Image (cartoon, rainbow, N blue to C red):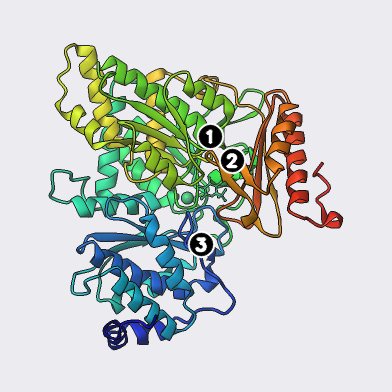
Amino acid sequence: MPAPAIWTWWVKTSAVGSRADKHPVPANVRFQYGTAGFRTIASVLDSVLFRVGVLAALRSKKLDGKTIGVMVTASHNPEQDNGVKLVDPRGEMLDTSWEAHATTLSNASTTDDFVSELAKFVEKLQIDLAKPARVVYARDTRPSGPALVASLEDGLRALGAEARNAGVTTTPVLHYLVRAINTLGTKDSYGEDSEEGYFQKLSSAYLKLVAPRQTPPPLLIDCANGVGAPIATRLATYLGDRLSLVLENTAIDTPGALNNACGADFVKTSQKLPPSLAGRLQPGQRGCSLDGDADRLMYFYIDQRNQFHMLDGDKIAALVAAFIVDLVKTSGLESQMKVGVVQTAYANGASTKYLTERLPVKCVPTGVKHLHHAAESYNIGVYFEANGHGTVLFSPAAQETLQTYEPSTPAQATALEHLRNLNQLINQTVGDALSDMLLVEVVLAHKAYDGSDWDSLYVDLPNRLVKVVVADRNQFKTEDAERQLVSPPGLQSKITDLARRFEGGRSFVRPSGTEDVVRVYAEAGSKPQADELAFRVAGLVYDFAGGNPTSRPKEFI
Ligand SMILES: CC(=O)N[C@H]1[C@@H](OP(=O)(O)O)O[C@H](CO)[C@@H](O)[C@@H]1O
Ligand SMILES: [Mg+2]
């Protein structure tokens, strides 16, 4: 269908066409707006950033000039990668229905195609181009960031958007800013629309929550040589002597250092202490790792025998959910406030058991947007991916109750005050490593726990994650929150039979949404058993997908 002439005319006569010419699409690259936005090698992203600028401005126009956020980051990926994601007015991730539009616009191969796609899009969504457009954007510390931001700015300029540069900051700060800007001066005001406002909000809630508690020993933070370093440095000044932060891996200007053998993803995947922390983290001391844009958090400690213990997103969920449930009970709000937890199939079975004994638990498909959405169905919804991304959401009804509830005893009043402060402390827009870190510190201080007390809430079931490279991962289809395969036919029953033969055996298979692989997860009563189950299932997957027997990985059984 040809684009309506009026829109084609508008797009051509506006600055879009001529500016788009300066940002040609590289040959033979296919872009996709996935769970984490666009993410790939930075050198091919120029045209994507320009087009995202145009799209962000259009999204703002569509939403009556509300401010849209754009974050330039590739999170825990290697330094040579970069990426970009959009943030909706309430500080949440871009509405899913726009992901496909982003993909289509980014793949139009010439300026003419792009202009024509744009025209169709404006027409289809009935976007009133006379409306204002407002966009706030930020980037992480990657060397490719400044040039990509310049391309983004060109796209924003092409649509005459009012653009605000939030500089170099974390993903959660950018999400905070978007919500703060859009609620400024309203009864739902989220805070001052500045980094200062963010630090103020978090630190004042933290200081109130720990006021009567003992100051804990220093906490070591592995900043992944990323943007968490400057932001945590500033946060530390607001915490004063109530929490001393020892920052490690802060080399944001050292080429190649970002996420290299450090950071939350390294800790989760290798289940090891980053080598750079050897000798820095004392036995018994609490440590944690952020990822490259500081939205994931992993805790850990080493015991007196130098053994490493990882406290992942599941352990954070267990710690925090149990604490909140206790506060809700103590405050007398139990009948009015439903607290629940959301996990994915990757949650360790021991965590699911621990949590299920205490509160409702839901399992949803991988990807933060699914968890976030499901958590909104509770009054207080705790969600964490095992990899350390998560937060706790307070529904509007819960916030109202917290404001209006009249406690009848001093104990109820104290618990209520704690819940109110937690609502201020916890980032309501997205997983936030620094906010989550303060949350964990609050619970540890209240419970007088050290790392090992926390760790012993439950014992992780040994597990193994294996990647299988197949010709076409799209032939793998799942149901039941990704725990059952429906295609290829016949494979699921073989996996089920196999898992049954292992004590405590559980295994599932799903196509990755971010890499061209199929992931196999397995749990069993011992580490060798978990490994064996994972490699047996990986072998089945490889064979079912028609893998070449001569290049079959030798560890597959
Ligand atoms: C097993 C695993 O850790 N999967 C990660 C990974 O998704 P995959 O779809 O498995 O590639 O990246 C996602 C985005 O960062 C994250 O949400 C998810 O938890
Ligand atoms: Mg991240």
Q: Nearer the viewer, residue 200 or 485?
A: 485
Count every numbered label the image shows and give the total.
3
Dot 2 or dot 1: first in sequence order is 2
Q: Is residue 164 above or below residue 384?
A: below
Specify the quadrant of the image occupied by residue 472: bottom right
SS class of the residue under badge 3? strand
Q: Nearer the viewer, mark 3 or mark 2?
A: 3
Pointer 2: what residue? Answer: 268
Dot 3 or dot 2: first in sequence order is 3
**Could you say where residue 121 lies in the image, as x and y percent from the top left?**
34, 72
SS class of the residue under badge 2? helix
Q: Is residue 277 above or below residue 406?
A: below
Pointer 3: what residue? Answer: 39
Q: Nearer the viewer, mark 3 or mark 1?
A: 3
Give the alpha-carbon distance from disc 3 to disc 1, as whole Å.
24 Å
**Could you say where residue 224 lies in the image, as x and y percent from the top left?**
52, 49
What quarter of the picture does the C terminus occupy? Answer: top right
Label 2 neighbour load within 10 Å: few <14, some 14-19, many 20+: many
The residue under label 3 is which amino acid type? Arg
Which residue lies at the image location 55% right of the left edge and 60% below the top edge? 79
Q: Which mark is residue 13?
A: none
Give the alpha-carbon distance from disc 2 to disc 1, as whole Å.
7 Å
SS class of the residue under badge 1? loop
Q: Is residue 546 above or below residue 263?
A: below
